[in-house]
Each structure stands twice: as C-alpha cells, then as structure tokens.
Image (cartoon, helix red, strand yellow):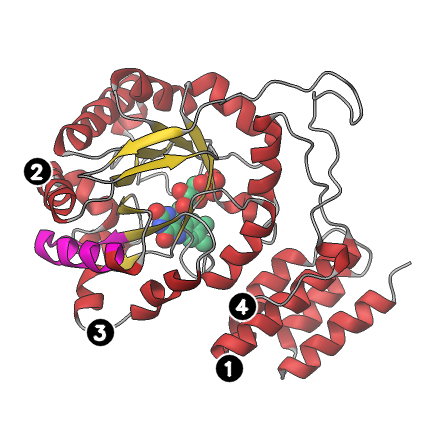
Amino acid sequence: MVATPSPRLNPASPVPAAGAAPLGSAQAPAALFPQALLLHGNGVERSLRCRVLQSPLAGVSDRIFRELVRRWAPEALLFTEMVNATSLELGHGRHKLEDLATEAGPIAVQLFDHRPAAMAEAARRAEAAGAFLIDINMGCPVKKIARKGGGSGLIREPELAARIVATVAAAVAIPVTVKTRLGWCGLTGDPAAVTAAAVHWCRQLESAGARLLTLHGRTRQQGFSGRADWAAIAAVKQSLTIPVIANGDVNSPAAARRCLEQTGADGVMVGRGTLGAPWLVGQIAAALDGRPVPPTPGPAERLDLAAEQLQALLASRGERGLLIARKHMGWTCQGFAGAPQLRHALMRAPTPAAALALLAQAASALP
Ligand SMILES: Cc1cc2nc3c(=O)[nH]c(=O)nc-3n(C[C@H](O)[C@H](O)[C@H](O)COP(=O)(O)O)c2cc1C
C-alpha cells in the first residue's frame, strides 16, 4: 500500500482547466464525453466513465505507481505491466495478477505471447484474479519479444494475431482489447500507404473479436522517434465500429483535446508524460470532463511523493525497492533549484536511509 498521502499531496484544490470557465464562475465547461463507453464482452459488459487511460509501462506501472495515479484519477482504466503468458504458465510473474486483489479501480491485464492456447489460459487466470478486461499487446517493439512473434511481431503475422484474439475472446467473459501500432515498417516513408496498411490491420483485429483498439500512431520501425501520426489514427477510427483510443504524444490536457479533435477517437491513452507525473491522467480527465484541473504538484509535494513512493517500494520489494525507486525519483525530482544535484546524489545513494535523508534535506532547503 502507498502510505496515506501528505496533506501537500492531496489533489483536492483544483485550478480551472485551460480554456475552462474560472472557478466560481456560473458557466461550467461542457464535458467532452458525457456518456460512459460501453464495452461488450462475451457475457460481461464493462462501462468506462473516464476516457483517459494510463498506458501500460513495463518497469513502471506497478501496483504502487497505479495507486498514485488513482489518487488523481480514481475512475481511469489502468493497465498492469505486460505479462508474458508462457512465463505465467511456468510460474513467473504471478504477483502481477495477485496484485489485482487490492486494485481500487478498473484494471486491465495486458498479456503478450505468440501461443494462442497459453494466451487463453493466462486470460482465464487474469479474469479470475479480477481483471476489468484483457488487453493483448501487439505493439511492443523490443527485439527479443517481437522476434519470437509477440508484441509488434504479431503485426507481421496477422492470421496468428487474429487467432490469438479469437481464442482469448472465447476463453473469457470480459471484453478483450488490443493495443497496437500503425504497422511494422514505414513503407518507404509513404504516409498514405502506412495509413492504408493500418486500416487493413486494425480491421482484421476488429473482425477477430477485439472490443476496443488502442492505437499508437507510430510504426514499429519508428520506435518512439518522430511524431505520432494522429491523421492515421483518424483514418482507422473512421473505418472501425469498435471504440478506438488514440495513443502517442498526449502529454497535457491541451494535447489531449487536440488529439481528440484530430482523430475523432473515443479516448486517449497517456504514457511517457506520466513518468514522474502520476497526476497527469487525472488532470487530463478533469479537463475533458469540464471539471477544475488539479494543480501540478510543486517542489515540496514532488519531494514528498518521491519519499512516499520509495518507502512503499521498500515495504513491498525490500532493498531492491531502492533500485526501482531510483528512476521514479529521477523523473519526479525536476523543476526546482538544486534538482539536478539532488538527482545525481540520489542515483548514488548507497542505502534507502541515505536516499530518504537526501530527500528530507532537499525539502528543508526549499525556500
Ligand atoms: C518505459 C516504457 C514502457 C512501456 N511498456 C509498455 C508495455 O508494457 N506495454 C505496451 O503496450 N506499451 C508499453 N509502452 C508503450 C506505451 O504504452 C505507449 O504506447 C507509448 O509510450 C506511446 O505513448 P506516449 O507518447 O504517451 O508515451 C512502454 C513505453 C515506455 C516508455
């Protein structure tokens, strides 16, 4: 459990959304999505009130990070870090499912593998553990995974991909969704060809039984370079009947609005923008709902957050918690005088106590 938040970290004193009516004004801005998104599974229907989704982030979106995200976005759909179906079969990664027992809001389990039967069995276990839905990773660009035919590797194996979706969808009652990219490669830089291929690929996933698609507007070849192609996402959205969530380069309420305007998507998913900023999903959700936006935490609150996350990681992972916390502390301790020196020292802190002392010292040195 993440400890009770410090009063400084209580996201209760919001500021108006950019372009929204000021606090106290009689005219509240209209919610962009007044209706919940309904996802029909194979017997179980899920209703999603919040149209901003927190990305699955391997090595980041663990239970402790998710608890922080929920502090600002209690209704948002969050994802586990990706779970490999074969590893689960062999007894590895079970904690990712066991953690679902304490999840306070909708949680999708993201699975990856190239074996339909293993995926179906993993999906059954995830459903039994309390998953809100099952998401299949067909976008991960990591070579080790794609080469074996998992993640983005499935883009090159559309028949197998369709079989995996259909097998998993038949194995569980909850909805099955897919997160993918525009395609495998950039088709020699021809954006129209990339878009046409993306439409074809995503239609195959829809026909196979995917109930929602999250589309990262880059090809596998692009990795994270260049800009996400929101126009291609718009073309896919127009050609599917299932909901489409736009993903790629949404890192502020203003960017989310622009992305939704340009894509016509049913929601947005936010990834890298949340590194060290677990408040971002909640801020974007508030802005889209026309609610006052919770303020971005300042230096003192960031230092509190870093210490809290470190303590929670130590409680759950023992001494190894310090290693995991390092990257989070590096992302969170930004934007104030002395932050670069603090980050440098934190990365070298030999013990948890030394890291906590550095954070406390930095907090007491704040003006
Ligand atoms: C550190 C990191 C870990 C990621 N892990 C996953 C993952 O486990 N599953 C997945 O589908 N995507 C993963 N992604 C991709 C993101 O979910 C997202 O699709 C991508 O970062 C684009 O969105 P953004 O521009 O908002 O970051 C990861 C990205 C990063 C940076």
Read off the magenta span.
111-127
Identify whether 45 is placed above or below 327: above
Q: Which circle, 1 or 2, is nearer the viewer?
A: 1
Q: Nearer the viewer, residue 164 or 70?
A: 70
Q: Is label 2 in a helix, a strand or a loop?
A: helix
Q: CA distance from mark 2 to mark 4?
A: 42 Å
Identify the mark at residue 91; answer none if there is no mark. 3
Q: Position of residue 249 (x, y in %)?
A: 50, 35
Please state which of the two labelled residues, at mark 4 or mark 1, is closer to the viewer: 4
Q: Earlier in the sequence, mark 3 or mark 2?
A: 3
Q: Looking at the image, which residue is at 73% across and 20% down?
A: 21
Q: Is residue 252 visible?
A: no
* Residue 97, position as x, y percentages in the image: 32, 63
- Labels 1 and 2: the sequence-earlier one: 2
Q: CA distance from mark 4 to mark 1?
A: 14 Å
Q: Name which residue type carries label 1.
A: Gly
Give the residue drawn at x 34%, y 30%: 38
Of the numbered discs 4 and 1, the one sitting upstream in the chain is 4
- Callout 4, which amino acid? Met
Q: Amino acid at mark 3?
A: Gly
Does label 2 or label 4 sit earlier along the sequence? 4
The answer to whether 191 appears left or right of 342 in the picture is left
Where the N terminus falls, by quadrant?
A: bottom right
Quarter-wise, where is residue 243 in the image? top left
Residue position marked by numbered label 2 in the rendering: 159
Q: Quadrant of the C terminus?
A: bottom right
Question: What type is the residue that disc 2 sits on?
Answer: Glu
Instruction: Give the x, y percent position of residue 278.
Output: 58, 50
Are the residues flagged by discs 3 and 2 in contact, CB closer than 8 Å?
no
Mark 4 or 3, which is nearer the eye? 4
User: Given contact means CB atoms under 8 Å apart, are the residues at marks 4 and 1 in contact?
Assistant: no
Q: Which residue is label 4 attached to?
A: 1
